[in-house]
Image (cartoon, rainbow, N blue to C red):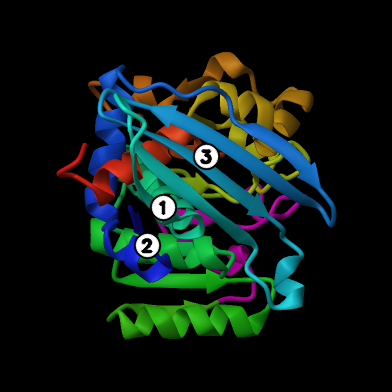
């Protein structure tokens, strides 16, 4: 059985290829996963247990998320994904859970942007310069050819560090004091924070694609109800969003959103025409996307 560290795991998960794998899993109807188990932990942490199975392989992901770890100099996300043959239970590998989470979340947003963004070539605004901000920057550059990025973050140092990384990838990068400074210049936005209050203003221009991935608990919210009320809403899974997407739950309470207005990714991928206007893709994570990542990492065994 192979045990892969973070670097080895990431190397097996190219963003564009992983986006294709997620699309295949979403449309196959042959992969299954129950709702994930979320167990609260001290210090605002959470323990997530996420099994999934297909005809070929099965996986179990065990991951902890501790947002306050950043203040301690520790990784906010830690975990592992155990990959096994579905028919026999024979273990094939243990993947680094944090690397899988970062790569598959960004690849999922890439897939949605590729399919539904009115103007998928950018420029891009990243809100939040942590692991997910970095992964989304890399994914949109690799999969969409985005060449210009604006970065805003809680700390100036983090924004500058990510901008330097973008420049190292050959991108034009600039930091901003806040999203409102550059909204008129971008066509793609990725919000990757754990904020409990909206990080985008209400006046997001029409025709922008927003991947909202940071808020994964009911008490977290990155988008204001006004943005949600006038956007096409696509969610990675309906059950997950109803349980955990604080942005949408807040908008529902404000009377700005109904769940009938949200389309699961699986259905949206079958649309014959992409919607116009502003498109919001809200994802909270699902074990099926970890299954897709495991298939990508081990194509000869799937």
Rendered image quadrant of residue 38: top right
Task: Give how far apart the Cα atoms at labels 3 and 2 are.
Answer: 22 Å
Q: Is residue 281 visible?
A: yes
- Mark earlier in primary sequence (2, 1): 2
- Mark earlier in primary sequence (1, 3): 1
Q: Secondary structure at mark 2?
A: loop
Q: Which residue is mark 2?
A: 4
Task: Give above or below for 184 relative to 239.
Answer: below
- Is residue 216 inside the magenta stretch? no
Task: Give above or below for 238 relative to 75.
Answer: above
Image mark for residue 94: 1
How dense is the environment of label 2, judged by Cα within 10 Å: few (below 14), some, or many (20 and up)?
some
Q: Nearer the viewer, residue 3 or 34?
A: 3
Rendered image quadrant of residue 7: bottom left
Q: Report x, y in % for residue 72.
A: 76, 76
Q: Are marks 1 and 3 in contact (CB under 8 Å)?
A: no
In the image: residue 294, left or right of residue 204: left
Task: Give above or below for 189 relative to 116.
Answer: below
Q: Residue at x 46, y 22 (%)?
A: 263
Q: Report x, y in % for residue 65.
A: 67, 54
Q: Which dot, 1 or 3, sits closer to the camera? A: 1
Q: Which residue is mark 3?
A: 285
- Is residue 179 inside the magenta stretch? yes
Q: Is residue 269 visible?
A: no
Q: Which residues are magenta?
A: 176-203
Task: Give how far apart the Cα atoms at labels 1 and 3 are.
Answer: 19 Å
Task: Give how far apart the Cα atoms at labels 2 and 1 are.
Answer: 6 Å
């Amino acid at each position: 059985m192979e045990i892969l560290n973070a670097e080895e795991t990431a190397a097996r998960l190219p963003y564009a290829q992983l986006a294709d794998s997620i699309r295949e899993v979403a449309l196959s109807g042959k992969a299954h996963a129950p709702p994930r188990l979320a167990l609260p932990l001290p210090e605002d942490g959470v323990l997530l247990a996420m099994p999934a199975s297909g005809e070929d392989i099965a996986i179990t992901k065990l991951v902890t998320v501790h947002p306050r770890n950043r203040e301690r100099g520790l990784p906010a996300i830690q975990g592992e994904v155990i990959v096994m043959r579905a028919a026999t239970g024979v273990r094939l590998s243990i993947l680094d859970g944090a690397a899988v989470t970062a790569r598959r979340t960004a690849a999922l947003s890439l897939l949605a942007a590729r399919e539904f963004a009115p103007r998928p070539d950018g420029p891009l605004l990243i809100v939040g310069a942590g692991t997910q901000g970095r992964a989304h920057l890399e994914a949109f550059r690799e999969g969409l050819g985005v060449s210009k990025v604006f970065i805003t973050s809680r700390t100036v140092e983090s924004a500058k560090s990510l901008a330097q990384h973008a420049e190292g990838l050959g991108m034009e990068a600039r930091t901003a004091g806040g999203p409102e400074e550059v909204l008129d210049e971008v066509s793609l936005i990725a919000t990757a924070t754990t904020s409990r209050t909206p990080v985008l203003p209400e006046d997001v221009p029409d025709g922008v694609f927003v991947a909202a991935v940071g808020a994964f608990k009911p008490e977290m919210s990155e988008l204001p109800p006004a943005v949600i009320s006038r956007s096409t809403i696509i969610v990675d899974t309906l059950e997950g969003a109803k349980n955990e997407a604080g942005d949408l739950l807040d908008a529902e309470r404000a009377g700005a959103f109904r769940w009938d207005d949200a389309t699961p990714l699986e259905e949206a991928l079958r649309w014959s025409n992409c919607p116009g206007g502003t498109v919001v893709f809200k994802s909270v994570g699902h074990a099926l996307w970890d299954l897709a990542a495991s298939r990508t990492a081990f194509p000869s065994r799937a």
